[in-house]
Amino acid sequence: MLACFGYKSEVSFIYRVIALALYEHVFLLRGDTPSSHVEAQIARFSALIEEQGGKVGRVEQWGLRSLAYPINRNRKAYYTLMNIVSERPAIDEMERQMKLDDQVIRFMTIRVHAHDDEPSPMTKLREGVRKGTPGRSDSESAPQEPGTGAHRARADRAPSHKKSTQEVRS
């Protein structure tokens, strides 16, 4: 039965099914890369995975972001996240191609148990910035008037390590 699908034995079929794994792959492209080239790089790496028998699921572009520290004299980079279902040799080949490409600053591939269906925290952060203050509800982001709420509690509270002027004089 399995021979008609190209598998010589049941063992090779089981090995083939088990060998596929889920990966999250993040890579950074130089900040001076044109946006059309960013799209071409994503398409190139996706095609590389698919021709090796893998599948690229969700692709999130996080856009041009500042780096925490300079990497090879670059202060900004285009971030991209790819969810991949593939065998390890396909991932190794993609990483080898990324090492050879001088537009790729850094990359990281992590094997995961399951891909998240919801957007990544970076995407949520970007959407939050577009809508208003990120990570806060409407009641928290509303300005507080002096003398009410949290401002009054802070104003009434005196630091415990300082003595009052009357205690110092006596």
Image (spheres, rainbow, N blue to C red):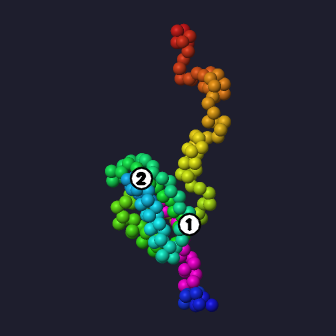
Which kind of residue does numbered mark 1 sit on?
Gly
Tell whether 168 sits left or right of 72: right
Q: Which residue is mark 1?
A: 57
- Along the line of sight, which residue is nearer the eye, 36 or 162? 36
For the image, the number of numbered tags is 2
Element at label 1:
strand
The answer to which image quadrant residue 154 occupies is top right
Q: Residue furthest front?
A: 36
Q: Nearer the viewer, residue 40 or 118?
A: 40
Tag 2, which secondary structure?
Answer: strand
The residue tagged 2 is 77
For the residues labelled 1 and 2, the Cα–Cα distance comes to 23 Å
Residue at image position (37%, 60%) is 103
Between 75 and 111, the one nearer to me in the picture: 75
* Quadrant where the C terminus is found in the figure: top right
Tag 2: amino acid: Ala
* Residue 31 located within the stretch drawn in magenta: no
| Residue 147: percent from left, percent from top | 64, 22
Say which residue appears at 43% left-offset and 47% top-offset.
66
Measuring 52% from the left and 9% from the top, which residue is drawn there?
169
The span picked out in magenta is 12-26
Place of residue 34 in the rendered image (x, y in percent of width and height, measured from the top left):
40, 56
Q: What residue is at 61 percent from the left and 40 percent from the top?
A: 136
The quadrant in which the N terminus is found is: bottom right
Percent of width and height locating residue 30: 39, 55
The vertical placement of 76 against 108, above or below, is above
Residue 92 in view, yes or no? no
Does 54 appear above or below 163?
A: below
Magenta segment: does it hold 24? yes
What is the number of the mark on residue 152? none
Sequence order check, earlier mark of 1 and 2:
1
